[in-house]
Image: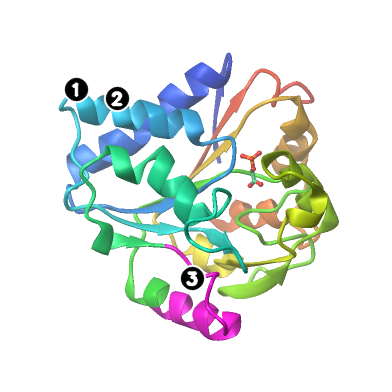
Amino acid sequence: MKIIKVKDYEELSARAAEIVAELVQRKEDACLGLATGGTPLGMYRKLIEKHRLGEISFKNVSTFNLDEYCELEKTHPQSYHHYMRTNFFNHVDIEMDKVHLPEGDTADHEAAAQRYNQLLKEARIDLQVLGIGSNGHIGFNEPGTPFSQETFVVRLAEKTRNDNKRFFNSLEEVPEHAITMGINNILQAEAILLLASGKSKAEAIHKLIKGGMTEEFPASALKNHKNVTVIIDEEAASLL
Ligand code: PGA
């Protein structure tokens, strides 16, 4: 794993955006694996800036998001469909028919997970962007998920629902299930870029970098991958 230590969130966002931009400039039809949550917001802002400056175009880029909550309509302010539109897609020249997220708002979640898995099998993700949960989850692969797992319907860990309640009015409103790429899908990406910022991620980053491989800590599966870059700020690196 290549570890890039930066000062703060601003610098982390800039470095992450540079890595994505460099790929899109080199390969105009790049396939990006995208993440939601608080961490990549700065990266998306920087990519939008680069697009406005004419440095990058997403016209031929395709994307696959890691996950989506079950039961939220696509227009729900906390759905990842809505997040991606408002924080990124609406501000760049990406073509929406090249954009993919799991369909969490369909009646049959299992079937939706299978459909997404099939799409992933037919795709080749050049760069997968990841955050990391404070419990070590990647996507919504919670502790105990087999490394061989493919796209599935997950029951979210209470820790995750608690971490994410800051985006909702109350814990009760946080969905209990999501559809997520499995760890095995994530490991198929050509390259992986994991971002972690802030003290709340310091313990997880310590485990990722210093610990062994165990299914109890999903991000440790990345140790099996040949091209992983981790960008961490000083606070996330504070236990190293
Ligand atoms: P965060 O989430 O970026 O909102 O901290 C990361 C994650 O849960 O993967």
Q: Identify the element where label 2 is drawn.
A: helix
Q: Which dot, 3 or 1, sits closer to the camera?
A: 3
Q: Are marks 2 and 1 in contact (CB under 8 Å)?
A: yes
Upstream in sequence: badge 3 or badge 1:
1
Find residue 103 and name its label: 3
Q: Which residue is mark 2?
A: 49
Q: Identify the element where label 3 is drawn.
A: loop
Q: Which residue is mark 1?
A: 53
Q: Give the residue type at disc 3.
A: Glu
Left or right: 58 with respect to 186?
left
Upstream in sequence: badge 3 or badge 2:
2
Instruction: Count residues near mark 2 (Cα–Cα under 10 Å), then give few for <14, some for 14-19, many for 20+.
Output: some
Instruction: Count residues near mark 1 (Cα–Cα under 10 Å), then give few for <14, some for 14-19, many for 20+.
Output: few
Distance of mark 3 from mark 1, alpha carbons?
A: 33 Å
Identify the residue at image location x=31%, y=31%. 48
For residue 213, what is the image quadrant? Answer: bottom right
Q: Identify the element where label 1 is drawn.
A: loop
Distance of mark 2 from mark 1, alpha carbons?
A: 6 Å
Work out which quarter of the rendered image holds the N terminus and state it.
Answer: top right
Q: Which residues are magenta?
A: 101-118
